[in-house]
Image: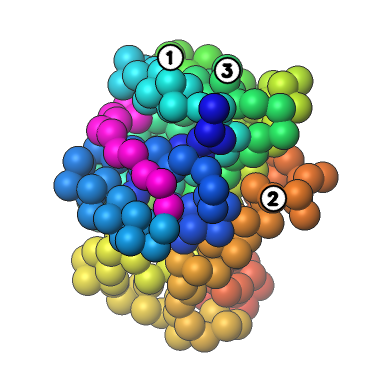
Amino acid sequence: MKDVIVVIGSGSIGQAIARRVSAGKHVVLADLREENANTAAKILTDAGFEVSTTVVDVSSRASVHALVEKATSLGTVTGLIHAAGVSPTQAPPATILTVDLYGTALVLEEFGNVITQGGAGVVIASQSGHRLAALSPEQNKALAITPADELLALPMLQPDKVTDPLLAYQISKRGNSLRVMAEAVRWGKRGARVNTISPGIIITPLANDELSGPRGAGYRRMIDLCPSGRAGTPDEVGNVGALLMGQDGAFITGSDFLMDGGVTAAYWYGDLAPS
């Protein structure tokens, strides 16, 4: 049977990683919107990759489980690239927590049951998780290990506590990196690895939504005042993803890789520091 790479979220970053790790393997592209998956599949197919598409709603366990069954029917799941999510401009707090936090926990649980020995996963988190103030050890542990189906019932995630979409996004992305740390222990028992990448402003359709939205001025200020002085590209994230999923990254698991051009450094210690 073929080795299978599952890509959830068919945007630019997921594609960029897939192009670097999927030669000779079967790519399963899953997206909430079928047309997005089909568009990405054509690009990859035209570049010589073997691709299937399917629809998935990461906020539904039944939908994620159906994706697992489709992937395992095609071969052995050796890789997972989870790049689906919504941004603060695109959704209210409850939706962000459901998709970005709960959905990621579901994906990690379900694929952690089938990932093969020697397999690897990458979850796309965000620099935003690094700008959230420190949580308590108890909150960190709750975000890391609470069973997925109980996650949204945590007191810290209730509507009266999370009223702002940006806060919901920051908590979700911090939660992603914590959840991956915990899942790395479970995946390790199967001989597999999993890590997060926390990109900064990477020029994608989602980033362009943010740049043209109500927080656009703040995003442009981040680009202007960060040490690198520019936004990133999906290919740069793809390079890190390839390291984490390949043999050169075989000693790396349960880790988060912040790649934001120095925005977080400037936020805590430089020109972007809150006044």
Residue type at numbered disc 2? Gly
* Element type where label 2 sits in the image: loop
In primary-sequence order, the first of circles 1 and 3 is: 3
Q: Earlier in the sequence, mark 2 or mark 1?
A: 1
Residue at 37% from the left image edge and 44% from the top image edge: 51
Residue occupied by mark 2: 246
Task: Work out how far the residue at label 2 is from the one at label 1, CA to CA, in angstroms.
Answer: 31 Å
Residue 179 in sight in this render: yes
Mark 2: give few (<14), some (14-19) or many (20+) Cα within 10 Å: some
Image point (28%, 34%), residue name: 54
Which residue, as the protein is rendered here, is positioned at the far left? 35
Residue 149 is marked as 1
At a point 75% along the width and 27% down the height, the residue shown is: 191
Q: How many marks?
A: 3
In this view, 97 is above or below 204: above
Magenta residues, start to end: 49-59
Are there few (<14), some (14-19), or many (20+) residues within 10 Å of tag 1?
few
Q: Can you tell which mark lies on residue 109?
A: none
Q: Residue at x 33, y 61 (%)?
A: 46
The foreground one among 44 and 136 is 44
Label 3 sits on residue = 113
**Viewer-side label of 2, 1:** 2
Magenta segment includes 56: yes
Where is 256 relative to 157, above or below?
A: below
Q: Is residue 193 left or right of residue 124?
A: right
